[in-house]
Image (spheres, rainbow, N blue to C red):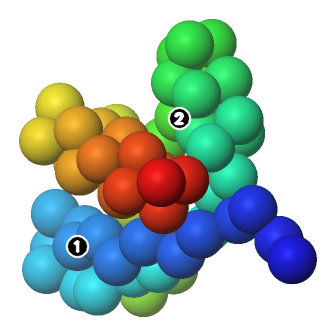
Amino acid sequence: MSDRMEFEIVCPSDHNQTVTFSHEEFEEELKSGTLVHHCNTCDTDWPPSSEEIAKIRKLFTKNSS
């Protein structure tokens, strides 16, 4: 079983995107400052908001329970 999870996000241009991370990958990218979302529809990169980070962490915590 994979420990990777899919998360739905919305880019600044209002396109729905799906990102996939393991909890470890997410925290490592966040800690290193390399966590950037990318929209394949409009080719936009943006950093996750603090709300998105909190939501993803909560979902990882919920999933590990």
Q: Which mark is residue 49?
A: none
Q: Position of residue 53 (x, y in %)?
A: 30, 39
Q: From this viewpoint, which residue is outermost toward the top?
A: 32
Q: Position of residue 6 (x, y in %)?
A: 53, 75
User: Residue at left 58%, top 28%?
Assistant: 27
User: Residue at left 47%, top 54%?
Assistant: 65
Which of 3 and 25 lies nearest the eye of the viewer? 3
Q: Position of residue 17 (x, y in %)?
A: 39, 81
Residue bearing the label numbered 1: 10
Q: Residues within 10 Å of mark 2 (few under 14, many from 20)?
A: some
Instruction: Identify whether 36 is placed above or below 63.
Output: above
Q: Secondary structure at mark 1?
A: strand
Instruction: Identify whether 63 is placed above or below 14.
Output: above
Q: Which amino acid type corresponds to the residue marked 1 in the rendered image? A: Val
Asked if the residues shown at circle 2 and circle 1 are in contact, with their CB atoms under 8 angstroms apart, the answer is: no
Hey, which quadrant is residue 8 in on the image? bottom left
Q: Does residue 43 appear in this view?
A: no
Q: Which amino acid type corresponds to the residue marked 2 in the rendered image? A: Leu
Q: From this viewpoint, which residue is outermost toward the right?
A: 1
Q: Alpha-carbon distance for marks 2 and 1?
A: 15 Å
Residue bearing the label numbered 2: 35
